[in-house]
Image (cartoon, rainbow, N blue to C red):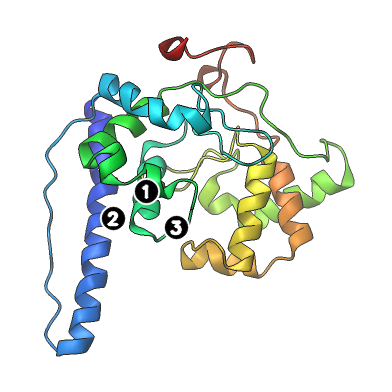
């Protein structure tokens, strides 16, 4: 529990400081005053049980298992890094990430404040992943799969990891177990400018064509999910909601 608290706290603190610095920079340009450093102390511990209650709102779309949909409408959230989940919720809440579907559900009046956000991401991170998630059309051994492997290993592996394990500390998303159509859709949105990401990711995506992105997403959809992170079967149902 302490470890989860520290990770969530780190994500919140970094994002809060980032937002605060952005405000200071804009006011500095207008007034000529020096930018002041701002520090924010957040003193709370995620509560898994309360997170389960909050997740009942999320389960309406992401499903009680948090497995999302293979058609790409909703991503698999189960087992995702807690810092990644927190960052995305805060980005959507602030408008940094555009999501008409999600925006009403991440507002304080709907889901609560930082405490409630930390509760729900901690809960989601404990859920087992779908052992039968949606995979791409090009299977291992095909030319398209190999081409996607080359793209991924050249451009994606340094952040998302050799097996798509991501990085919790740096809030790089875990790709393993994610539905292919969601991965493909997000890459297309980044390339077309509909989704804003960090400069490094944006530069990489802009430098690749749509076919390369599709094949990289296909390759990523076949990553092996560790057994300890998966549900026992595709018929598993979250006992907290059944």
Give the secondary structure at mark 1.
Answer: helix
Are the residues at dot 2 and dot 1 in contact (C-beta closer than 8 Å)?
A: yes
Which tag, 3 or 1, sits closer to the chain's start?
1
Left or right, 148 with reference to 54: right
Which tag, 2 or 3, sits closer to the chain's start?
2
Q: Crowding near pointer 2: few (<14 within 10 Å), some, many (20+)?
A: some
Q: Please name the residue that numbered disc 3 is placed on.
A: 97
Structural distance between the alpha carbons of marks 2 and 1: 7 Å
Q: Crowding near pointer 3: few (<14 within 10 Å), some, many (20+)?
A: some
x and y percentages locating residue 101 in the rendered image: 49, 47
Left or right, 214 with reference to 46: right
**Is residue 152 shown above or below 115?**
below
Q: Please name the residue that numbered disc 2 is placed on.
A: 15
Structural distance between the alpha carbons of marks 2 and 3: 13 Å
Q: Mark 3 vs mark 1: give the one in front.
A: 3
Give the secondary structure at mark 3.
Answer: loop
Structural distance between the alpha carbons of marks 3 and 1: 10 Å
Which tag, 2 or 1, sits closer to the chain's start?
2
Q: Residue at x 23, y 37 (%)?
A: 6
Q: Residue at x 79, y 59 (%)?
A: 211
Report if residue 152 is visible in the image: yes
Q: Residue at x 74, y 61 (%)?
A: 210
Q: Please name the residue that numbered disc 1 is placed on.
A: 87
x and y percentages locating residue 24 in the rendered image: 19, 74
């Amino acid at each position: 529990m302490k470890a989860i608290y520290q990770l969530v706290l780190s994500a919140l603190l970094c994002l809060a400081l980032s937002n605060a610095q952005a405000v200071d920079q804009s006011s500095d340009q207008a007034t000529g005053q020096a930018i002041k450093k701002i520090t924010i102390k957040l003193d709370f511990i995620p509560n898994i049980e309360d997170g389960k209650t909050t997740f009942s709102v999320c389960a309406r779309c992401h499903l009680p298992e948090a497995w999302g949909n293979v058609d790409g409408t909703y991503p698999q959230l189960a087992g995702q890094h807690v810092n990644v989940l927190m960052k995305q919720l805060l980005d959507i809440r602030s408008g940094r990430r555009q999501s008409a579907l999600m925006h009403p559900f991440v507002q304080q009046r709907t889901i609560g404040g930082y405490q409630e956000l930390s509760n729900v991401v901690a809960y989601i991170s404990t859920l087992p992943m779908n052992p039968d998630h949606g995979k791409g059309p090009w299977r291992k051994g095909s030319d398209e799969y190999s081409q996607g492997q080359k793209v991924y290993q050249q451009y994606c592996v340094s952040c998302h990891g050799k097996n798509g394990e991501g990085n919790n500390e740096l809030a790089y998303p875990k790709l393993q177990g994610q539905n292919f159509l969601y991965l493909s859709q997000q890459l297309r949105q980044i390339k077309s400018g509909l989704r804003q990401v960090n400069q490094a990711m944006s530069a990489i995506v802009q430098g690749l064509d749509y076919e390369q992105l599709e094949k990289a997403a296909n390759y990523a959809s076949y990553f092996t999910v560790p057994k300890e992170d998966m549900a026992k079967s595709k018929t598993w149902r979250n006992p907290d909601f059944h």
